[in-house]
Amino acid sequence: MENVKSEQLFNRAKRRIPGGVNSPVRAFGPVGGHPFFVERAQGPWLFDADGHRYLDYVCSWGPGILGHAHPQVVEAVQRACAGGLTFGAPTAGEVELAELINACVPDVEMVRLVSSGTEAVMSAVRVARGFTGREKIIKFAGNYHGHSDGLLVKAGSGLMTRSEPDSAGVPAGYAADTLTAVYNDGESVRALLEENYGQVAAVVVEPVAANMGVVPPEKGFLEALRRMTKEHGALLLFDEVITGFRLGLGGASAYTGVHADLYTFGKIVGGGMPLAAYGGRRDIMFCVAPLGAVYQAGTLSGNPVAVAAGIATLKILMDDTGIYERIDRRAQTLSEAYRKAGLVVNRAGSLLSAFFMPDRDVCGGETVSGVAGEEQERRKQARQVENYGDACRCDRKAFADYFNRMLAHGIYVAPSPFEAMFVSDAHSDGLIEKTCEAVAACVRGG
Ligand SMILES: *Cc1c(COP(=O)(O)O)cnc(C)c1O
């Protein structure tokens, strides 16, 4: 494929923008090669600077649940633009969006609008600390909550007892207040809560994890978090920046039946514009300035153009009751194609990930036939992805090969093995069928 223009743009970009991109994963690091530069997008398609068309399963990493440039959303944005881009004063739209969020997720009794998911989680954590008067938080290895200092923390070598910054420039002191537990392992949380008795403000979790690939919560895991946080006087914070309005209108709390104290939203809630939100229990949100002592503000918060995109998107999702059934069914069809191709698939609603897990036969260097029952079981386990450790065992080279073959077939999946595949309402049954055929060819190396 000719990629002359994208290559030229990338070379120019690298001279003025670190790595040539404004967010690292866009640089195609894990899959090699150069990123294509997008010229425009419509429905399920991306069109690049060299005139290629790609079927897009990244959907801007989540916002694009309706496909690109949905006419009603675009019209709402254009109308808002014509009335002024930003005022720094309240508007009716902000009230309407807050009411719509509450209508979809009743646990969110009060809500603040901000401009990015990072800002939403950072602010919600501050509120949790302000409300409880405690300083520590617990997060999970492999969950992503944006790039604020206190949340860019990974489990250190002494897993669960020591945390290290996951980025240069994050002071060790920040990391020290962020404790890291193991996803789907309630006991790891209990241990941290007990070791840090009376000091934990919140447990922050992706209720369905989607930033180490998709990893759904095992039965009982979120319930255990709910129970333990209550027992310990800590708040439960569901980071629904991906799952909000994705797993259904009610997000993960409706999907799993477990209810948090605080929630964060982003991606879909902004309809493709820079908008995110945090909210939850009224008594907790009363801590936020100007009502309370927790300061949080934003020049562009509740931006009228972004709000218009959010309202238009949520209204479409609320009016067209068939959307979630359609995208979930299509994601299931894709899941089956990946499974048939021999991959390990995790799916929740229209979010899915296919993991290139080491072959059972290869794992351990001996064939499965002839190993004892217990060992058989361990190896079967090895082909499930339930936490970050599991996800990290995937075959990155095999993924990169598959990614590049898919791209050559005109299909764009996330350029990293640790990202979800997003199905939008613009992915028709016919396109899903074509994708399944491509999967069969590309996983096997066709
Ligand atoms: C994307 C994401 C964020 C960060 O949102 P940005 O808008 O990229 O800052 C936070 N939490 C989760 C779960 C996310 O997926």
Image: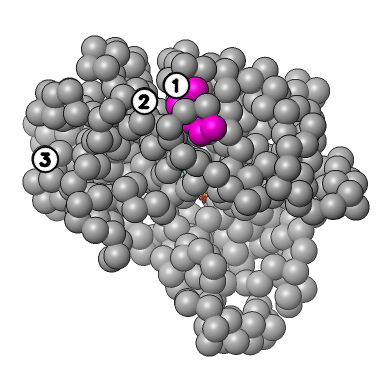
Q: Amino acid at mark 2?
A: Phe
Residue 241, percent from left and from top: 52, 38
Residue 197, percent from left and from top: 14, 24
* Side of 122 where 192 appears, left or right: left
Q: Amino acid at mark 1?
A: Ile
Q: Are marks 3 and 2 in contact (CB under 8 Å)?
A: no
Look at the picture and state if 112 lies above or below 53. Answer: above
First in sequence: mark 2 vs mark 1 = 2
Q: Amino acid at mark 3?
A: Thr
- Which is in the foreground here, disc 1 or disc 3? 1
Determine the CA span between mark 2 and mark 1: 6 Å
Residue depicted at x 17% and y 23%? 198
Determine the CA span between mark 3 and mark 2: 25 Å
Magenta-highlighted residues:
286-290
Viewer-closest of 223 and 236: 236
Q: Which mark is residue 131?
A: 2
Q: Which residue is mark 3?
A: 161
Label 2: few (<14), some (14–19) or many (≥20) C-alpha neighbours in 10 Å: many
State the quadrant of the N terminus: bottom right
First in sequence: mark 3 vs mark 2 = 2
- Quarter of the image holding residue 388? top left
Q: Which residue is mark 1?
A: 284
Determine the CA span between mark 1 and mark 3: 29 Å
